[in-house]
Image: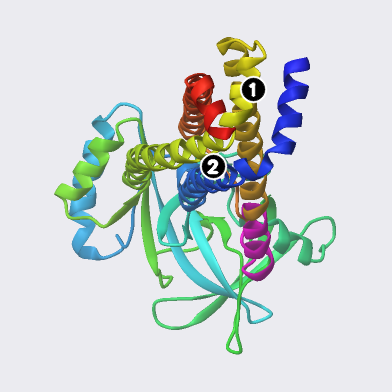
Amino acid sequence: MTAIKHAILMIKKTYKNYILLSVTAFLSFSFMFMYLLYTDSEIYNKYKWVLSLDNKVVVAHNVNDSSVMEKLRIVEAQFEKMPDTYYYYNKQCVARTVYEMDCPVNMYPSYVWGLFEGNTDGQYYGYERVKLDKEYELEIGIDKAVVSETVYNAIQKTGDKKIITLIFMDINGNEFMKTFEIVGTYKTNTGMVINDSEVNTVIDPVYINIGSVNDKEIKIDNVELVTYSERVDQVIELLKENALAFEETKSIQNEALMEKINSIENKYIIVIVLFVLLGINLYSSFENAMNDRKYEIGVKRALGASKFDIMKQFTIEALMIMVANIIAAIFMVLNGILLYKWILNIFKNKVYVIYISKESLILYVVFTISLVVIFSLLFAYRCTRVQIVKYLKEET
């Protein structure tokens, strides 16, 4: 404890000797931590949505063209032979409400094991599993419908139930009206209105049983073949062989993992470069600090201080200076990225997650500890090499 108090006292007295050292260490530790934290956060926010998706889902789309029906039958036959592989068709069209709002309609079989809606997050595309009333499976009867919670809350009850009336268009351009009883809801982040313009307003999609309407007579905009398989690579290969357009998540997740691996490799390069540059600057700064205190060292040695005493004192001083700079660097970078997060939230309405990977954290700890220990000990050792008598004579 006495040694620590003495070290603090000497740092206060000789603070000018440590200014250059502190600036060098602070900037280097700050840059290193900022680089690791920022790159990890950017990659995490870039792919967080994609990485949360189920990579066993493959969705073949635009398959309502008659020219692809034969290919689909081939694909279906192969799916039937694949263990742990399930599929269904989702037919999509756009209807209108009685309030002249456009409404995407998804038509499913009576029972499906999971609904997967396509979404975008920037340029990365994938299919997210829709949760319906805390369940993922959908079992829906004839003339029944599932709507978003926002749409459900906006509809007034008719008797003891809520209904939604939709206006469809048949293949001849004629309109007809159909009423559905709402039997379930799902959550959405968009709210009721997902596209508002002077032309029209679009509400959240409605899910119905395909048997509720004659899908042969309705104008269908798109048909999706939704597949869930433990053998997703085989499914993808089969769709490619039959030249079917499809979307899947696995390859995008692999891209995310590859970018993460590349970023780790870049981090090692940055760390090595910084270690060398900071090492050179630290050595120079420690050398200057030692030269300014040679007389002090000489006096202490002349008064009986051992080399171990000198080394202990300067090791403690160096450790305290370096640790203080590390703490200050971390504090500054964290406040900086919190400000960056706040700016994105206020001005771009973007939810930004601050994230640092385990690899980066370990890398930073190893980087800082190595520098602190190596150069603190080197500084202390160099101080013990001062030639006492010669330097005292030069001073007098």
Q: Position of residue 281 (x, y in %)?
A: 44, 42
At 64% from the left and 57% from the top, the residue drawn is 341
Check the image and name the residue furthest to the right: 159
In the rendered image, the quadrant that contains the C terminus is top right
User: Amino acid type of disc 1?
Assistant: Val
Q: Position of residue 4 (x, y in %)?
A: 73, 21
Q: For this rendering, which residue is in front, 152 or 303?
A: 303
- Residue located beneath label 1 in the image: 299
| Left or right of residue 31: residue 272 | left
Question: Disc number at residue 375?
Answer: none
Q: Main secondary structure of the magenta part?
A: helix
The image quadrant of residue 176 is bottom right
Residue numbers of the magenta segment:
337-350
Query: Quick check: can you spot residue 314?
Result: no
Q: Estimate the spatial distance between the alpha carbons at disc 1 and disc 2, rounded to whole Å.
A: 29 Å
Q: How dense is the environment of label 2, judged by Cα within 10 Å: few (below 14), some, or many (20 and up)?
A: many
Question: Could you tell me how many numbered marks the image carries?
Answer: 2
Question: Disc number at residue 25?
Answer: 2
The image quadrant of residue 65 is bottom left
Q: Which structural element holds mark 1? A: helix
